[in-house]
Image (cartoon, rainbow, N blue to C red):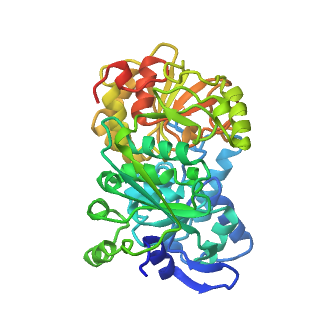
Amino acid sequence: MGSTLFEKIWDQHSICDLGDGNELIYIDRIFLHERTGSIALKSLEERKVPIRNPNQVFATIDHIVDTFPGRGDKTLMPSGSDFIRSLRASVKGTKIHFFDIDDPNQGIVHVVSPEQGIALPGITYICPDSHTCSLGALGTLAWGVGSTECEHALATNTLIKKKPKLMKIMVDGILPLGVTSKDIILHLISQHGADGAKDHAIEFMGSVVENLEIESRLTLCNMAVEFGATTGIIAPDNKTISYLEGKAFSPEEDFNKAKHYWSELKTDQDAIFDKTITIDCSNITPYVTWGTNPQQAIPISHSIPFVDQIKNKNEKESMIRALEYMGLEQGQSINNQKIDAAFIGSCTNSRISDLRSAAKILKDKKIADNIRAICVPGSSQVKKQAEEEGLDRIFKSAGFEWRESGCSMCFFAGGESFGENQRVISTTNRNFENRQGKSTRTHLASPMTVAASAIAGKISDAKSIGIEQ
């Protein structure tokens, strides 16, 4: 019997079976950020426990740092500066690779890691952030951990983990013009539930996945955790290899050797998965969420379901609460719903291809009156490239704020937020209650849909406002 890609990487990193359903797994690379990484490092210092392999540890400042120009160490989050200073002090004098605020390689962990070649095919990789699964797009076995697990891995390069079940998601068909990987993942979650992949590791496969560029694959894997998965992964191919060649932390002298190994990393034809889901993308249209979890999503041209259509009691109760929180009604059309703000950013959709797609919609246009629109590039490298291409001028001319890189208003941690009861269309990955501010109502969508909505002043896709894509 053959093995899946996940099993091959897992087995290569399994040190021993602990006999209780758990295995001791070797961890190759660890990425920290100031919000929780600083806590793990401080705890090790206080216990006088050394970092086992600091050369394979990376850190950046992204989660709670302000994104306003000229930000420095200041944050709107109470005591936020303390986290920044603590991380900076902890990495000083170590061999940890650190991307400080003024470093040209600073940015969101899950954006910096691929663009620097830190996440690589076939390695195990952790970060104290739930969207670490993004890096599965490169064939990396990556998942998010808590501060305590992170601390253990820093000290030992190991973690105790139970092997998840395995799920195959076949994504086939012809992806319609204007439909993105963000729409694919929202469609998947809406059809199969926010816990549809609970206790599973997903491998995304199929012709559509093969045709996606690496940055679109990163978006797809980013939201695997919103589907309840432990992680998501995609087999490396020639696109992956080309993408990684010449990256700062990719193999240099041994690249050809690595290239050969990576090209062999794939699921065997006779491998067995515990569950398989097939998606035909041919009829998918742009999606948007209407509720307070990513499962509560519909095509932008559709109406919100009626409560009586929901059979599961818990889902019905969740829907009633979501409608009340979002200020919407069952059966109501989501298209043309007035918005107060638009946000383009986060580890889900803040890469250069995301900004290009939004800028294509915004070029020579203006956002609607009374709309606050913000664009936050995912890294300083993305920001620099966007400015070299003139994308910043398009965003600013349209009426968007152009920011420094960071997580920004992807989540509210006591810092900057949108206003109470404000309706925001956002490229982020979570629309939970209070996620972007106290009582803020968040609708998730792709960068193109967010840009089109900002122009219209209401939830709209590019086609509905007469823009060819």
| Percent of width and height locating residue 135 | 45, 59
| Image side of residue 428 versus residue 411, left or right | left
Residue 358 picture quarter: top left
Please state if 91 lies on the left or on the right of 361 as rendered.
right
Residue at figure coordinates x 58%, y 62% from the top left: 230
- Quarter of the rendering containing residue 278: bottom left
Count up the numbered dots: 0
Q: Which residue is pictured at 60% across the width and 77% down the height?
A: 158
Say which of 357 and 3 sits in front: 3
* 401 up-or-down from 369: above or below: below
Q: Is residue 322 above or below residue 279?
A: above
Q: Where is residue 398? Give x, y as percent.
A: 38, 21
Q: Is residue 405 at all visible to an observer of this figure?
A: yes
Please determine whether, in this image, residue 316 is positioned above or below residue 116: above
User: Can residue 31 be spotted in the picture?
Assistant: no
Which residue reaches farthest top? Answer: 369
The residue at the point 32 percent across, 48 percent down is 173
- Closer to us: 272 or 224: 272
Residue 468's spot in the image, x, y percent? 28, 26
Residue 57, horizontal then vertical, whole percent: 52, 68
384 displayed left or right of 19: left
- In the image, residue 51 above or below residue 173: below
- In the picture, which quadrant includes the C terminus? top left
Please tell me which residue lies in front, 144 or 20: 20
Relative to the observer, which residue lies in front, 369 or 382?
369
Quadrant holding the N terminus: bottom left
